[in-house]
Image: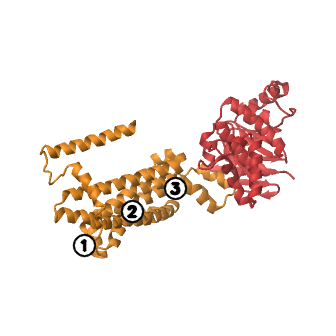
Amino acid sequence: MPFVRKLAGLVGFLLLWEAAGRLGLVDARVLPPPSEVLVRFGLLFTDRGFVAGAVSTVLSWAIALLCATVLGVGVGLLLGSVPALRLITMPVIEFLRPLPSVALIPLAIALLGTQAQTKIVLGVFAATWPILLNTSYALGEVDPRLLETVRCFRVSRWRRLVGVTLPSIGPFVLTGVRISASIALIAIVGTEFLAGGSIGLGQYAFVQGTSGGRMDVVLAATVFAGLFGCLVNAGFLAVQRRWVSWGSVASSSGEVAA
Amino acid sequence: MSMLEVAGLGHAYGGVDAVSDVSFVVEPGELVCIVGPSGCGKSTLLRCIAGLLPPTRGTVSLHGDRVVGVPSDLAVVFQDYSRSLLPWRTVAGNVEFPLRDRGLSTVERRSRVEEALSWVGLSEAAGKHPFELSGGMQQRVSIARALAYRPALMLMDEPFASVDAQTRADLEDLVLTVRASAGMTVLLVTHDIDESVYLADRVLVLSQSPATVVETLKVDLSSPRDQITTRGTDTFVRLRTEIARQIRR
């Protein structure tokens, strides 16, 4: 029954929103009621501009998340296993990590232009940190007794890494990737918003909102972005439950960068 | 030649002796128990023998070869089974994991896993994951893993200290049976005097920290041993009293 209860909350929220518009509490041109937004949402997929934008955003997101994962896990493993290196780089990381990637958009556009590479680079920048930190902290959490046991059996260094260390940190890394997935989406859509002449959900919404005043289209595109984010998160949670169920304790305490 | 020879072994943590001067030998096929009060340096001694900790003084030799680093012919069963099994591998996967680096074929590995699991009575649980098993069963998996490895010497560090009394008795008997069927040499560390007498061919009694061997007792109890009758014999009672006196001293 919790599913029905969750759904009830959503339906209630939509009803309130609808009522606010119908009763004239808010200007329907600024905040169109959900009934209109949902109809518009259905029609979005016949709009070539939207489809091109959505494809561009999703592709850029996927590329950015993949790069961030490779980079974050690689550097995280390096920093986690070489304490001296970690000590030297931590101040730099602690300075760069809290920088809101959105604030870097003008700099990135000036450096890289308004093409897809800009939003991908910013997406990677924003999404790398949770993965990197989760990976390097998780390395310190690998049970020393487990490592000692396999060392007693003279398991090779390579198999200790692949067969023991990596699966041990798996749940933490996966949690990092899940957090990063939404962070990358925010950075990418935000960049599209500010980068004039680019293709993407953000630019689509920007143009529809400022030159056409089509708030129903803007909100429909927002609903699309929101749904996409929800589905990705649910997908990662399902993967986590399916493949690393033994690490459920580790993963819930693994959100060090959350 | 002795299976294990420990000569003048000592280990100090930051200048404080944990083990001061320990010498003993273990002959092939023997089951030797080391018993001593809590915190006397038993685990330090065992870690030195396993090559996990370099001794400050003295030497350890495994069938004549001086031990430097972890020797290839040795397996360790630790007390905390839940932390020494790979949670993402099945029971069979855990037993098989160390065998891959021993240059065995797939068929050989599989037959060793099956054999070891049948020795510890876990053939049925081969496909399960450790978290699906009770503590006693998890410790059986650790023992099976050590057996499948076929070490010349099996070290056990307080292997039954974290299970309930009934399971403990079952596991003690299990060690006695598999040791007979696998022809294993075992060195077992415990703080439990009764357990040491029940299991051992010979008991080494350690002093308070820093540890030294204060007494070596031959256990002349007949085999097979039985949890009820053996523990009631005069010899058993005499030996446990003797050890308790040595430890209190």
- Distance Cα–Cα, label 1 vs label 3: 44 Å
> What is the chain letter for disc 2?
A
Q: Relative to B153, is A129 on the left or the right?
A: left
Identity, as a three-letter code, of the amino acid under mark 1 = Gly
10 Å crowding of disc 3: few (<14), some (14-19), many (20+): many
> Chain B, which colour?
red
Q: Nearer the viewer, mark 1 or mark 2?
A: 1
Closest to the observer: A156 or B34?
A156
- Residue A126 occupies quadrant: bottom left
Element marked by disc 1: loop
Identity, as a three-letter code, of the amino acid under mark 2 = Ile
Q: Nearer the viewer, mark 1 or mark 3?
A: 1
The picture places residue B216, in percent across and down from the top left corner, at: 81, 39
Residue that appears at 57% across and 56% down:
A165
Closest to the observer: A89 or B165?
B165
- Distance Cα–Cα, label 3 vs label 2: 17 Å
C-beta proximity under 8 Å, tags 1 and 2? no
Q: Which residue is mark 1?
A: A197
Query: Residue A139 bears which disc, if any?
Result: 3
